[in-house]
Image (cartoon, rainbow, N blue to C red):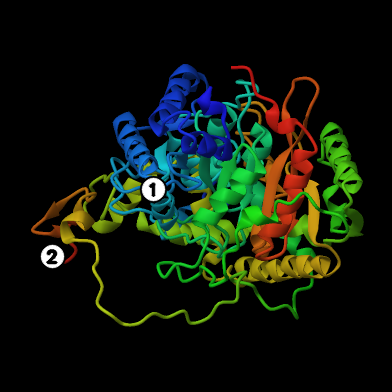
Amino acid sequence: MSIFCGFMAGTGMDIKYVAHLARLALTPEEEEKLGGQLGNILHYIEKLNELDVSNVEPTSHAVPLVNITREDAVRPSLPNEEALRNAPSKANGLFLVPKIVE
Amino acid sequence: MLNQLTISEAAEGLRAKKFSARELLQSCLDRVKQVDGKVKAFLSYDEKDALAQAEAADKLIASGQVGPLTGIPIGIKDVLCVKDHPLNCASKILGNYRSPYDATAIHKLKDAGAVIFGRTNMDEFAMGSSTENSAFLTTRNPWDLERIPGGSSGGSAAAVAADECLATLGTDTGGSIRQPAALCGCVGFKPTYGRVSRYGLVAFASSLDQIGPFTKDVRDTATLLNAISGVDPMDSTSVPEPVPDYTKALDGNIKGLKLGIAKEYMVGGLDPEVAAIVQKAIDQLRKLGAEIVEVSLPHTDYAAATYYIIAPAEASANLARFDGIRYGARIEGADPIELYSKTRGAGFGAEVKRRIILGTYVLSSGYYDAYYLRAQKVRTLIRNDFIKAFEKVDAIVTPTTPTAAFKAGEKSGDPLQMYLSDIFTISCNLAGICGISLPCGFTAKPKLPVGLQLLGKSFGESTILKIAHAYEQSTNWRKERPSL
């Protein structure tokens, strides 16, 4: 029997909760397998705690471009039919989705 | 055999009317039919469409409108949009998707008269280092069919190494062009972040992804970079930096250029045979007149950990769009959340799920500062290491990979080991600089290619192309071919 019970060994990760946040259905087998593998990876990542980063600015982007704008002009865009052509379900020029409000 | 030609050789033949673009393409098609059952570089190709493009190129040539890429067959990684062609990212979740528009890089190749040919295999959503994460098939290394071609752009590398087309495009987020180029024995180039527009590239990690070429020699890489580079209003991260003629840099003269060797790259996991081959290449560069200087990149050892926070974090956000609503496969649910979860659970493979979970976790409330923000700060340290090193040197020389190609199945059970096969290529993406891998020899037994990596400053493409070309022309590695 597995000792795995939602929380991964050695970490604070509740895999069921994280999978819910990611809107990702996992089988119990996947949860268990991913749990062990992610435990190893997170342990490896802990390496970053060796460094003092208290006076370091974060880099979100390697190229410091800011406020790239373009003229607010009307341009041709993808025709409705083209935009919908890969839709799994559509009607009346719109995407069809399950009912959200009763 | 026309399929064995380089782009520049083929362009010369087309211009001199020694053969037609149709004959050139037919030669590639014949080769694909002959070897791709073994190599499995292509997910699909549309023969009729490619032949129509080749015929159009022949008309251009007949009317005297012939450029360096007119009529040249170029394979495309299955992550770039080509109008009306399938796009799957080697994933099941995209179903029967067909691109409604061209990526900017594709648009530019079409404008240059190239023949867009086939969809090359890859790790699902470019996540992996072996193509074993493709939902459809595992590409094989043309030098040894029991081995992997590297990844994630393994199909693009194998297609060029097996002479199935003259060149291909791939993408590189942490080494996905340079690593397979090294393992398959071709030239692979990762441009500076912002050099090539990412419009029409399915995003994996938006702050790291770049499109780049696989070719048979350095000149062809320069030719393709000329065509695909440049600022694009459709990608606000593309940089308005002028595009020089990269072929002009290929003058063979590297006398006095300073090349840095980083001691942090000569680490324990580096195979001694690979290390010796790379050392010989460094000696050769010295003989060609380059000055070899030791540099330090002290945070190298933290690059993989930084990458495996930042890349999955960005991926978890980017892949949220695959939810079964607007495109791709859908599994119905009682409500939208159930529909999303079921569709994603069935549509994504194991590695993609692993990274989505990891990325979601490091961005989640309570963990963001400890993981994601800390990784972004270490990214600054890694970037500063390179800025400092490039004050002293014109380029940095390293092995591209710690080992030659490994066997299929060897690392697929241990994701962490697989991640560490990218340790020499990851820093380049984090720092946003450019890098190239080119063949620099072969292991003895079995005979497998080894790659030399040159890392250059931001927008220093010309310098590393110049060095790579000088080295390449002083050796004969590019003339070696696998026996298939």
B438 to the left or right of A18: right
The answer to whether residue B25 shows anywhere in this view is yes
Identity, as a three-letter code, of the amino acid under mark 2 = Glu
Residues under labels 2 and 1: Cα distance?
A: 24 Å
Residue B64's place in the image compared with A69, above or below, is: above
Q: Is residue B54 left or right of residue B74?
A: left
Residue B120 higher or lower than B247, as above or below: above
Q: Is residue A80 above or below residue B285?
A: below
Residue B93 percent coordinates (x, y): 35, 44
Residue at image coords 59%, 71%: A60
- Residues B114 and A67: in front is B114
10 Å crowding of disc 2: few (<14), some (14-19), many (20+):
few
Q: Amino acid at mark 1?
A: Ala
Q: Would residue B64 be found to the left or right of residue B292 on screen?
A: left
Who's the residue at 32% across and 47% down the image? B343
Which residue occupies 47% across, 42% down?
B124
Residue B5 in percent (x, y) is at 57, 31
Q: Is residue B134 above or below residue B369?
A: above
Point out which mark residue A102 bears.
2
Chain of the residue under label 1 = A
Instruction: Name the residue carrying label 1.
Output: A25
